[in-house]
Amino acid sequence: MSRSLSYRPDGTFKIVQFTDLHWTNGGEKDKRTRALMERVLEEERPDFIVLTGDVIESLRCNDPLQSYRDVLSVVAQKGIPWASIFGNHDCEGNVSKEQLMDIQLGLPGTVAETGPANIAGVGNFVVPIADSSSKTGAALYFLDSGAYSELTAVPGYDWIRPSQIEWFREQAARLKEGNGGVGVPGLVFFHIPLPEYREVWDHVVCHGHRYERVQSPKLNSGFFAAMVQSGSVMGTFCGHDHINDYVGTLRGIKLCYGRATGYNTYGRWLYRRGARVIQLRRGEPGFETWLRLAGGKKVVHARKHSPNYFSRA
């Protein structure tokens, strides 16, 4: 399938984001995850599907490679372009990102790439969305946010590395040059939230829920600054924290959590699994976003959160 995506004739482009499926061996909870995914895709009929990490929980899989193939087949059989990026649970144990990426690249419909060998991670790539004149109207960036810190002085989760940040700068500059010196509006997808996700909740009015602390890296590598400086990123989308789904705008960029999709992992009582939906309109700034929950409910107006001292953590 061509890696070039296009707006619909009416000028819209719709994305469904699934995150944290935590698929294991195809049991009853995985079947519920599949049913939810299929219902969301039927209700929303998107132009593109993205899975933002922890697609499988590899340590609990009898055969991680087969589990990865099984869950990706749910989207690969729909005839809709799609891509999947890695989280911290996809490649634990004896399975590698390279093995999983080979499986993804062998399935129909994916627009993913392994990415440059000289930068950190596997699956760093950018996909353009063409407008009616075949020029690039928007760009979708995908980055491997890693798994766990390898530095004893910095425990916890990994971070987007300097080589990836430089790659992002180069891609944004290349797109800008090809667009007559005007930055191409971009959306950025990764798994682990940036430290700025904590900052936006603490200091800005957000919409949605934060039922757990933001599990971002303890080291801020500067990726958010690079996105702000590019002048072209409209929004970012992550997963990782299963019972957070809020959206807030910080320094001109809308920071968004997905809605956890998988039933084979932790959640919260009465907090339904679901998906985030993103819609672009050709030639218009920004984007619309909403949640589609299990049971079919569409959440357009999420709960408002105003920052206060007691909410900070």
Image: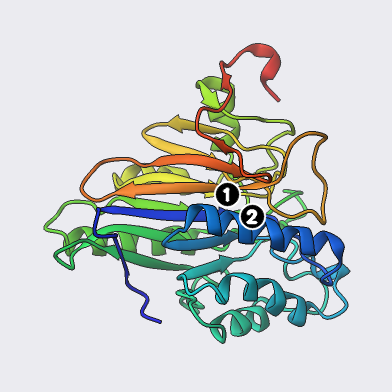
What residue is at 23 percent from the left and 51 percent from the top?
A: 183
Q: Is residue 156 left or right of residue 137?
A: right
Vertical placement of residue 285 versus 63, above or below: above
Work out whether residue 167 or residue 89 is closer to the camera in this orientation and state it. 89
Q: In this view, does 85 lie to the left or right of 100?
A: left
What residue is at 71 percent from the left and 51 percent from the top?
A: 157
Work out whether residue 78 or residue 236 is closer to the camera in this orientation and state it. 78
Instruction: Give residue 139's quadrant in the image.
Output: bottom left
What residue is at 68 percent from the left and 52 percent from the top?
A: 261
**What residue sits right under mark 1 in the picture?**
238
Q: Is residue 241 left or right of residue 187?
A: right
The amino acid marked with disc number 1 is Cys
What residue is at 83 percent from the left and 34 percent from the top?
A: 269
N-terminal of the pair, mark 1 or mark 2, is 2
Q: Where is residue 84 in the image (x, y as percent from the top left)?
A: 57, 67
**What residue sits right under mark 2 in the picture?**
19
Q: Position of residue 179 (x, y in %)?
A: 16, 59
Q: Where is residue 128 in the image (x, y as percent from the top left)?
A: 32, 65
Q: Position of residue 19 (x, y in %)?
A: 64, 55
Indicate which disc residue 136 carries: none
Work out whether residue 267 or residue 179 is closer to the camera in this orientation and state it. 267
**CB-based contact (under 8 Å), mark 1 and mark 2:** yes
Which quadrant is the N terminus positioned in? bottom left
Vertical placement of residue 82 versus 140, above or below: below
Mark 1 → mark 2, Cα distance in angstroms = 8 Å
